[in-house]
Structure formats: C-alpha cells, structure tokens
Image: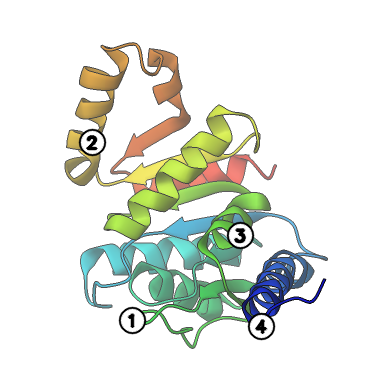
Amino acid sequence: MVECSEEIIEKNKIASNFNEIASDFNDSEKIFKDINNCVTFFGSARIQQDNKFCKIAEKLAFNLNKKGVNIVTGGGGGIMEAANRGAYNANTAESIGLNIIIPVEQKLNLYTTRSHTFNYFFSRKYMLVKHSSSCVVFPGGYGTLDELFEIIILVQTKKIEKLKIYLYDTEFWKNMLIFLEGTLVKENMISLDELDILTLSDDIEFIEKDILKLFN
C-alpha cells in the first residue's frame, strides 16, 4: 500500500511533535540534575518592574536565594523577571527560567543562570513545580490562573506531594476564594478541606520564614 503525500506529512508532523515533547521534558530535567531547594514564583507577565508586586517578588526572591534557595520562574517579564532579578542579584543559588515560545509578551529575561525554552504549555507547567517544595502566586491574569489551578489539581490528586501554595495579596484573591467556598464547596464539587491546599497571606515575611522551614 502506497502512502499518499498527506499521510506522510501527517506522520512526519506527529513524529516532530513527539520529539518536541520529549525535548521539553528531557532537556529541562537536566537543569535540575544537581540542585534541590527550589521555590517557584508565578504572576503577571504584563506589569512593569516599578509595580509594587514586582518589588515584593524581587525582595522575596533575593532573600530566599541568599539562603540557598533556587528560584524558578516562567522566564518572562513582570513577576517572573522581578523574581529572577532578585535571585540573580543575590548570586547564592540558581535563578532558573522555564520559558515558552508564544507569539506575544514572552521572551527570556536577562536574569537567569539556567534556562530552557519549551514548546508546549502542559510540559512547562509540570516542570515549573516538579522540583519545587513551594510556590508563591502573585496577582496575574489568565496565564497565572491557569498555572494556579493546574498545580492545585496536581496537589489535590497527589501527583505532586508536599507542595505548598502561597497566594500573596488578600485583596486580589479574596473574591476567587469566596467563589470556591461559596459555590464549589456549597455544591459539593470540592470539599472544604481542599481549600487548605492554599495559604493566603499579605505577610511576605511570614511566607519567607514558612518556606525556609521546609528546607530545615
């Protein structure tokens, strides 16, 4: 049976996609080969570096890195750049950026010591937290919410264990939590104790100290 050109093209496309997926996991795994003590930062890519959330993220990343904690981000701008800059300037542990190819917004910031550029979101989201003991989620848009709920599911289903999730800024997150408890819990779509996956705080010093306890 002779394959038509369309079938050959489709098979080549599938093979190419498989190789890209394999590269996403295998090549990014090499970044973490010799390191432990990782914390992941999430948040908006669109906000400027003089935004209060960027300043707080940079300070937290600096303080953690000074104490030997490797900082992991999505490698882009906004909160990601701020956290990478803090870690880079601390210059004690690694500043890791897991970037992705998309048409707008995303380019690797200048403050990473190790990086990888992904082809697919699903592989990137998993690798962003696979080696981390905790993550700090700052205010953000669709991408941040997508990442947040992905890691909630990973923790809920125990695909990743012992990952603490901190939500910074009560004012920003409160309406989401009201929805989760007032609608999803009320309708028995999640249980009340599943909200314990999340730690909401305005106290960045508490978050820092609580994270450091994980490594003692």
Please state, as top left, top right, bottom left or bottom right, where the N terminus lies in the image: bottom right
Report if the CB atoms under discs 4 and 2 are less than 8 Å apart.
no
Exactly how many numbered labels are in the figure? 4
- Which amino acid type is marked by label 1? Val
Above or below, 191 against 111 in this view is above
Alpha carbon of mark 1 to alpha carbon of mark 3: how far? 19 Å
Above or below, 144 against 211 in this view is below
Q: Position of residue 13 (x, y in %)?
A: 65, 75
Q: Please, what secondary structure does the residue beneath circle 4 have?
A: helix
- Which amino acid type is marked by label 4? Ser
Circle 4 sits on which residue?
5
Label number found at residue 123:
3
Alpha carbon of mark 2 to alpha carbon of mark 1: how far? 27 Å
Label number found at residue 104:
1
Q: Nearer the viewer, mark 4 or mark 2?
A: 4
- Which amino acid type is marked by label 3? Ser
